[in-house]
């Protein structure tokens, strides 16, 4: 499933995605350290550097996904759409419990060190919301990694942008370590929920450059373990 209107910006340790339609560009997440620089590089390589960035769609509130949201949206005058249940993350005041407190400590150190800018979304995302961008995206609440963790499903293509539902690498696909998950049981239910969709492929934020169909097969194998 190769598409000319879809670009994945690959930057360690997390990827994010650019969707192009007749109006311009929309991002799904905005990357981590160096993400803004990598975005410019990838857009130039694609010939999209003069296309307007109209919106930034957030999968969840972890810092490696939202560090550059305010900067990019502000520079381009883009709107921000983000899951309502992760609101505290966008303001820079998330609460973590259990093993995920480790992630909370790391983010507490990282926010001032990396220059995180808090933001308030222009659009709050809830399960089932439809976004009239690209080929059309439906919000699918997939909690467990965070309370508001959300995937975006394109029914026309059978394609799910699944955020951090899992990490996809050859021979080393895995669920996120427990220090980054708020509730393991909910996460496993979210995997089942995702696989119940009429999928042709998935695109994770942590993974190699395999096609969406390969990522989907890795997720199915992981769920059977």
Image: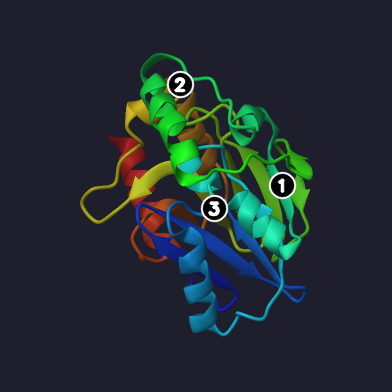
Left or right: 103 with respect to 19? left
Query: How many residues crowd mark 1 within 10 Å: few (<14), some (14–19), many (20+)?
Result: many
Instruction: Tell me the CA gap for discs 1 and 2.
Output: 24 Å
Q: Where in the figure is residue 79, as x and y percent of width and height?
A: 76, 54
- The front one of 216 and 7 is 7
Q: Is residue 117 above or below residue 23?
A: above
What whole-number distance in Å separates the C-alpha atoms at marks 3 and 1? 15 Å
Q: Residues within 10 Å of mark 2 (few under 14, many from 20)?
A: some
Q: Tell me whether circle 3 and circle 1 mark residues in contact (CB < 8 Å).
A: no
The residue that appears at 46% across and 29% down in the rendered structure is 108
Q: Which residue is mark 2?
A: 183
Q: Crowdedness of circle 3 by 10 Å Cα count: few (<14), some, many (20+)?
A: many
Q: Give the side of residue 117 with respect to residue 195, left or right.
A: right
Residue 73, horizontal then vertical, whole percent: 68, 57
In front of the other: label 3 or label 1?
1
Residue at 48%, 82% in the rendered image: 45
Q: Quadrant of the C terminus?
A: top left
Residue marked by disc 3: 161
Front residue (pair 141, 116): 116
Give the residue number, with chain letter if any, for mark 1: 81
Q: Are marks 1 and 2 in contact (CB under 8 Å)?
A: no
Secondary structure under badge 3? strand
- The quarter of the picture where residue 134 lies is bottom right
């Amino acid at each position: 499933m190769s598409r000319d209107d879809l670009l994945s910006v690959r930057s360690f340790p997390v990827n994010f995605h650019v969707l192009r339609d007749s109006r311009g560009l929309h991002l799904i997440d905005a990357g981590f350290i160096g993400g803004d620089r990598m975005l410019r590089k990838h857009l130039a390589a694609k010939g999209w550097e003069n296309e307007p960035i109209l919106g930034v769609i957030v999968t969840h509130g972890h810092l490696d996904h939202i560090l550059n949201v305010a900067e990019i949206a502000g520079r381009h005058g883009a709107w921000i759409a983000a899951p309502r249940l992760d609101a505290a993350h966008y303001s820079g005041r998330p609460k973590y419990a259990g093993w995920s407190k480790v992630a909370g400590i790391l983010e507490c150190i990282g926010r001032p060190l990396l220059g995180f800018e808090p933001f308030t979304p222009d659009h709050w995302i809830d399960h089932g919301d439809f976004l009239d961008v690209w080929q059309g995206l439906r919000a699918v609440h997939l909690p467990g990694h965070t309370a508001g963790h959300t995937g975006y499903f394109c029914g026309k293509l059978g394609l799910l942008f699944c955020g951090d539902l899992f990490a996809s690498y050859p021979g080393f696909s895995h669920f996120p370590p427990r220090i980054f998950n708020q509730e393991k049981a909910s996460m496993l239910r979210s995997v089942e929920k995702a696989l119940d969709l009429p999928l042709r492929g998935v695109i994770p934020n942590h993974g190699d450059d395999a096609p969406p169909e390969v990522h989907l097969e890795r997720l199915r194998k992981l769920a059977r373990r």
